[in-house]
Amino acid sequence: MSGSKAQPRLPPRWFIRLFWFTHRRVYRLTRGRLGLWRSKPNRWGALRLSTVGRRTGRQHSVMVGYFEDEPNLVTMAMNGWGEGEPAWWLNLQAHPDVRVDLADGPPRLVTGRAATGDERERLWSRWRELDKNLDAYAARRSSETAVVILEPRS
């Protein structure tokens, strides 16, 4: 393996799923007092994204990392760096008008879409500044990871 960088290790898939399940549970049990944090210039934050199920029509919520790109919020549809698209991203594509909860302030109504072209490259570069292993993690997936923009609804 001379000359090549070792891929960063990820925890086992069951641990990643347990972590996100526990994260949502802590948020619910503390009625939103714990579980979310604001992004900062050198660190991503965590928000709660509520989508409408594409098949059920029921509301589903998930915690995702984000950063601010005024006035938008930017996340990635990474599925814990596993294969396949996360359900929330499939739901958002079917019903792009969603709600986000941040660590402070009232819920925000936003419309989600995938970044493309130069915009995607710019936002991916910003993610790379926040996570030095981003490209190595993304290389684990056989498909491109969507960069998702959550734009304020008027």
Image (tube, rainbow, N blue to C red):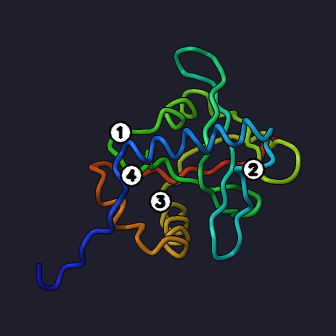
Q: Earlier in the sequence, mark 1 or mark 2?
A: 2
Most foreground residue, 70 or 100: 100
Secondary structure category for the residue under label 1: loop
* Spatial separation of the CA atoms under disc 4 and disc 2: 24 Å
Q: Is residue 54 above or below residue 12?
A: above
Q: How would you rate the neighbour count of disc 3 (Cα within 10 Å): few for under 14, some for 14-19, many for 20 or more?
A: few
Residue occupied by mark 1:
84
Q: Earlier in the sequence, mark 4 or mark 2?
A: 2
Q: Earlier in the sequence, mark 4 or mark 3?
A: 4
Looking at the image, is mark 1 or mark 2 nearer the viewer?
A: 2
Q: Residue furthest bottom?
A: 3
Residue occupied by mark 2:
34
Q: Residue furthest top?
A: 56
Q: What residue is rendered at 49% in x and 65% in y?
A: 124
Please state if 154 lies on the left or on the right of 99 as rendered: right
Looking at the image, is mark 1 or mark 3 nearer the viewer?
A: 1
Residue occupied by mark 3:
117
Q: What residue is rendered at 70% in x and 64% in y?
A: 39
Secondary structure category for the residue under label 2: loop
Q: Earlier in the sequence, mark 3 or mark 2?
A: 2
Residue occupied by mark 4:
81
* Spatial separation of the CA atoms under disc 3 and disc 2: 36 Å
Residues at discs 3 and 2 in contact (Cβ within 8 Å): no
Quadrant of the drawing holding the C terminus: top right
Q: Is residue 128 above or below residue 81?
A: below
Q: Amino acid at mark 3?
A: Gly
Secondary structure category for the residue under label 3: helix
Where residue 98 sits: x, y (%)? 70, 35
Q: Is residue 13 above or below residue 92?
A: below
Where residue 151 sits: x, y (%)? 71, 48
* Spatial separation of the CA atoms under disc 1 and disc 3: 22 Å
Q: Amino acid at mark 1?
A: Gly
